[in-house]
Amino acid sequence: MYKFKIGALPVVDTANKVVGIISDTDVFKAFVDLLGYAKTSTKITVDTQDRVGVLAELADIFKKRGVNIISVLTRKLGPKRAAITVRADLTNAMDIIQTIRDAGFVITDISTLKVDDAHEN
């Protein structure tokens, strides 16, 4: 859809009968749901070494604090650096932020998304 700038595609059954369509809005909504943007949460991004186990170390901090992780994104920053973005089910991040820093992670971004109750899943 993106490559060919198509806004919608037909959905067919096993007999190739059209049974519906999927639109770019459907795809966008799926990403919003997958990434946790449909509920109140806090996003924390860290710059860290790109090495085996670093994601587990960061996740363990959330586990020990009893904080549910909604989604995780990783991005290479260079040959040995990575950014990890965690969206977590919390609105007051100050306590966990200090714990993350104490563990040696460099926090590069913190933001809280507040979604009113009518729009939360």
Image (spheres, grey):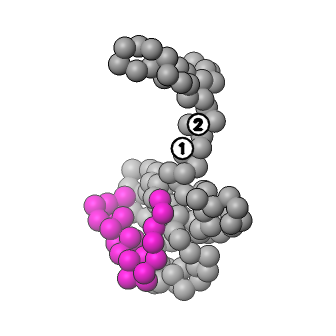
The N terminus sits in image quarter? top right
As for residue 67 lying within the magenta part, the answer is yes
The C terminus sits in image quarter? bottom right
The foreground one among 97 and 119 is 119
Q: Residue at x 45, y 14 (%)?
A: 17
Q: Which residues are magenta?
A: 50-71
What percent of the width, then of the height, locates residue 88? Answer: 52, 69
Q: Quadrant of residue 93?
A: bottom right
Tell whether label 1 touches label 2 (CB within 8 Å).
yes
Helix, strand or loop status at disc 1: helix
Q: Residue at x 29, y 65 (%)?
A: 53
Q: Quadrant of residue 50?
A: bottom left
Helix, strand or loop status at disc 2: helix
What residue is disc 1 on? 30
On residue 26, which mark appears? Answer: 2
Q: Quadrant of residue 68?
A: bottom left
**82 lies left or right of 116:** left
**118 lies left or right of 3:** right
5, above or below 44, in the image: above
The foreground one among 109 and 118 is 118
What percent of the width, then of the height, locates residue 98? Answer: 52, 84
Tell which residue pokes out farthest to the left in this image. Answer: 52
Q: Is residue 77 visible?
A: no
What percent of the width, then of the height, locates residue 6? Answer: 61, 20
- Which amino acid lies under the numbered mark 1 shown in the image of this protein? Ala
Mark 2–mark 1 Cα distance, whole angstroms, equals: 6 Å
